[in-house]
Amino acid sequence: MHRFLVLGHEAHTSPDFSLDDVPGTSGRIDVLARCAASAFLLSHGIRMDVELYLVLCGPSRPPRTIRMVGAELRHLNPDERSTAALFLRALQIESIAESMSTPGIYVSGMGFAKLLETLGGPFILLKEDGEDMRNHRVPRDAIFVLSDHIDFNEEDEKALMAHDPAVLSLGPRSLHSNQCITIVHNELDRREATV
Amino acid sequence: MHRFLVLGHEAHTSPDFSLDDVPGTSGRIDVLARCAASAFLLSHGIRMDVELYLVLCGPSRPPRTIRMVGAELRHLNPDERSTAALFLRALQIESIAESMSTPGIYVSGMGFAKLLETLGGPFILLKEDGEDMRNHRVPRDAIFVLSDHIDFNEEDEKALMAHDPAVLSLGPRSLHSNQCITIVHNELDRREATV
């Protein structure tokens, strides 16, 4: 299983944004939509063996966690708008306990620290100055933790570091979170193919 | 310089599509928009050392080639809609000779075979059954040639094979073209960093 967690610092937690201007009205839910596309989409199909956690921390009722499960997903399209529409639908659910919004998409009132605690690890934090991922033995079912376009704040980083994550780098350039997901998949795919 | 060429088999060559439904109305110009984002965008900035050629072959006046130059680009945003809007603007230009549409974006009436001939190579064709890119010495300024969501047809492939491209694979899974661009960048970035 390839597992990812992305923190959306300002991502709206109410279904109050416009699909005609997702970047401008949603606290950058477009970033999370691209992460979902990178996490689940192959050239002709969906990666079944993937789980993605999106933690949304923006207005008006933070936090919300959207959990996406590859084996259950139906009809995830590569364009941002249709994925943002799925998130819009998920955000219409207000319950704190996890409930299913559409097949493979679950939503709850969990926040970042609590989610880390529930998942338990092993976590991997991607950072430019980390150890090269290509030289690191990644534990099975490790959860790669990424931030959106805004860096982790002190509190988030403290919550994560309490779980003693491996700190890994993907290469010399600083990339978008969806690009990082693509590169992590590729490295894990290669390893799994040679087992 | 990292160079990419993406063939958009059905991508509209007239500015006749809707930004509210790019996947459904443009012959999948959203695929090309995602390729542009992967080709040019770093976490906080634009890759200056990139050139991207998009060959559009859909209705109503094919072919059109959009050439994007990292060093000249202004304001490329990561969302698909705003990039599709730049393409819409480029397609308003009807001349066969290349002209600039917006900074760093040029458009002409060149087709795939003619473009290959003009560029001259060295070309690299990405294919699942190719040699592993990690084991291949990529020539300087090589042009990575990709197709959109539709495979190359016989005529396109023949035109490309006439230029004797290296045929390389990025890994065991079949990926979207924008994901391939991300992985190629990462591999080239790593090599350039260790020179």
Image (cartoon, coloured by chain):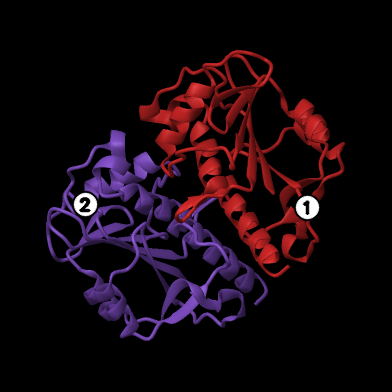
Chain colours: A red, B purple
Residue for point 62% across, 55% down = A185
Disc 1 chain ID:
A
Asked whether A47 or B192 is in front, the reply is A47
Q: Which residue corresponds to the image point at 61% horizontal and 50% vertical from the top-left?
A: A181
Is disc 1 placed on a helix, strand or loop?
loop
Q: Position of residue A103 (x, y in %)?
A: 53, 31
Q: How many numbered circles are shown?
A: 2
Mark-to-mark CA distance, 2 and 1: 44 Å
Output the chain of dot 2. Answer: B
Check disc 2 and give the amino acid type.
His
Q: Quadrant of the C terminus of chain A?
A: bottom right
Q: Three-letter amino acid code at disc 1?
A: Arg
Q: Residues within 10 Å of mark 2 (few under 14, many from 20)?
A: many
Asked whether A141 or A27 is in front, the reply is: A141
Say if residue B43 shows up in the picture.
no
Left or right of residue A137: residue A172 = left
Position above or below: A165 against B151: above
Residue under pointer 2: B12
- Taking the image as drawn, is residue B165 in sight? yes
Q: Are marks 2 and 1 on the same chain?
A: no
Q: Which residue is mark 1?
A: A140
Where residue B141 appears, as percent x and y from the top left, is: 45, 76
Q: Nearer the viewer, residue B98 or B186?
A: B186
Query: Image point 18% across, 46% down: which residue?
Result: B15
Instruction: Report whether A60 appears left or right of B14.
Output: right
Q: Nearer the viewer, mark 2 or mark 1?
A: 1
Numbered badge on residue B57: none
SS label for mark 2 = loop
Task: Find out whether the residues at labels 2 and 1 contact each other: C-beta distance under 8 Å.
Answer: no
Q: What x and y, as percent, mark residue A130?
A: 77, 55
